Image (spheres, grey):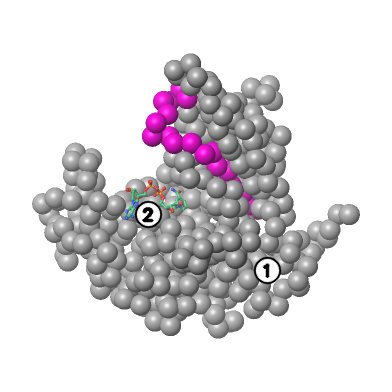
């Protein structure tokens, strides 16, 4: 993409601009060879497919899908498939590169990939979604596989979607190939602990950050944005470990209790009423102000671009644990660094999900399944080691944590590339 073509008002929030800015800064500090930069900036493979589908009302519709493999240098590419009306190739490309760095930070043997289908799941029936998924799978069939590219769920896709991908792939191969996707239902080769993995990973790295500062987790005040898989699970596990979750922010409101919210009661309230607002044991407060509350930990776990140049200088948290992908814009990074806020960057903080996806792939290939204790123990080992790798890299090179995570990741991928050499 030509950066000049993006209006300046949108540059701060464009995912590709953020991905490039961070790559460039890290590559510069690493003194990375210009040729290696060119290779690592480009996606290895980009596929655009047409997906003709018969709709329930008898009409034909043609959807567009993408699958991008950014890198396969350290292993098969790995990354989710999202269904959304506004999916773009730029977005899929940026997210694929993101996955390369994320897998390298936690040192699992995968490269990065991502897929997307332009469609609106809100207006499609389960049957239509199944037909889109199966036709998309058959169109990208030649480039996915346990040794090539292993998709997973992402926005608006779920374990059922993965079951359809696995089944379609398996029917073509004339054998059941569970390891072609992760995030599957347990009955079809999914892994125990996968649903909680991203939230659990966030809690593990937050505990490490508190240990780093000598802060007792008991009564540590946490503000969580997003009460879905990542935010909800992080809040639940943190509350069980003694943290005080003082505020939950959702798209329709924020609920606050200075003494700490009863997270499981709030989940029940949301299930019953459809909203976190109006919770008897909390006070409804302004969503924008909630991000600026005085607390030890802010955990953005909803969406991208919530910490920007418009609010970064007013954030009071000591630690930001990025549960979401891209919650901070690259322009806000410098403001947070100036304020000496300790950021656990997304490519480290939310890597618990892809780590347990890796465990799922390993278990499928072995045909031997682990109990939850083993999954959680191995996840903890990887998250703790990765946190320590990033923080010691940051201290050694005198850079902030995000830059350290990118430098570490780029260094690992570039070293693997150089050792393999170029096939010509
Ligand atoms: P989810 O859909 O389960 O939850 C997201 C929640 O955020 C929803 O409850 C939604 O209502 C809420 N939300 C949306 N917009 C909001 C806003 N403006 N303010 C406050 N709340 C808002 O999604 P998820 O799986 O929890 O993913 C959340 C983020 O974490 C995404 O950025 C995703 O890419 C990232 N992530 C998820 C995983 C995973 O394993 N699920 C792994 C890595 C990264």
Residue identifier under label 2: 302
| Cα–Cα gap, marks 2 and 1 | 30 Å
Residue at the (78%, 67%) spot, across then down:
35
Please give the name of the residue rendered at 25% of the width and 73% of the height, measured from the top-left corner.
Answer: 294
SS of the residue under disc 2: loop
In which quadrant of the rendered view does residue 408 lie?
Answer: bottom right
Mark 2 sits near ligand 1, with its Cβ under 8 Å away: yes
Quadrant where the N terminus sits is bottom right
Q: How crowded is mark 1: few (under 14 residues within 10 Å), some or many (20 or more)?
A: some
Residue that mark 1 sits on: 411
Front disc: 2 or 1: 2
Q: For residue 286, what is the image quadrant?
A: bottom left
Residue 123 among those drawn in magenta: yes
Identify the residue at horizontal 55%, vertical 42% (top origin).
116
The region drawn magenta spans 108-128
Q: Position of residue 76 (x, y in %)?
A: 68, 47
Q: Residue furthest left?
A: 280
Q: Nearer the viewer, residue 225 or 16?
A: 16
């Amino acid at each position: 993409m030509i950066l000049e073509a993006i209006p300046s008002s949108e540059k701060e929030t464009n995912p590709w601009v953020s991905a490039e800015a961070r790559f460039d800064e890290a590559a510069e500090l690493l003194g990375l060879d210009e040729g290696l930069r060119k290779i690592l900036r480009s996606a290895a493979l980009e596929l655009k497919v047409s997906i003709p589908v018969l709709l329930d009302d008898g009409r034909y519709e043609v959807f567009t899908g993408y699958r991008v493999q950014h890198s396969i240098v350290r292993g098969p590419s790995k990354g989710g498939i999202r269904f959304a009306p506004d999916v773009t190739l730029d977005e899929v490309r940026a997210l694929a590169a993101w996955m390369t760095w994320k897998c390298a930070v936690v040192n699992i043997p995968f490269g990065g990939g991502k897929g997307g289908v332009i469609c609106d799941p809100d207006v499609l029936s389960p049957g239509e979604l199944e037909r889109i998924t199966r036709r998309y799978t058959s169109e990208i069939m030649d480039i996915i596989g346990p040794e090539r590219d292993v998709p997973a769920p992402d926005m608006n896709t779920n374990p059922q979607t993965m079951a359809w991908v696995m089944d379609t792939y398996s029917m073509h191969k004339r054998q059941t190939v569970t390891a072609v996707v992760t995030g599957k239902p347990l009955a079809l080769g999914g892994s125990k602990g996968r649903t909680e993995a991203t939230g659990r990973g966030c809690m593990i790295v937050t505990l490490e950050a508190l240990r780093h500062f000598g802060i007792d987790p008991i009564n540590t005040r946490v503000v969580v944005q997003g009460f879905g898989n990542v935010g909800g699970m992080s809040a639940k596990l943190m509350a069980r470990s003694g943290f005080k979750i003082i505020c939950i922010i959702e798209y329709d409101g924020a609920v606050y209790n200075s003494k700490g919210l009863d997270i499981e009661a709030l989940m029940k309230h949301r299930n019953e009423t459809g909203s976190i607002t109006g919770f008897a044991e909390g006070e409804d407060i302004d969503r924008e102000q909630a991000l600026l509350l005085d607390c030890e930990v802010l955990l953005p776990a909803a969406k991208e671009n919530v910490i920007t140049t418009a609010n970064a200088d007013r954030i009071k948290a000591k630690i930001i644990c990025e549960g979401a992908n891209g919650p901070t814009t690259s322009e806000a990074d410098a403001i947070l660094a100036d304020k000496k806020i300790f950021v656990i960057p997304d490519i480290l903080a939310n890597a618990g999900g892809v780590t347990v996806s890796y465990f799922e792939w390993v278990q499928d290939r072995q045909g031997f399944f682990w109990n939850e204790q083993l999954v959680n123990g191995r996840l903890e080992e990887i998250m703790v080691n990765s946190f320590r790798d990033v923080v010691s890299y940051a201290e050694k090179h005198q850079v902030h944590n995000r830059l350290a995570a990118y430098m570490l990741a780029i260094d690992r991928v570039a070293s693997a590339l150089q050792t393999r050499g170029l096939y010509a």
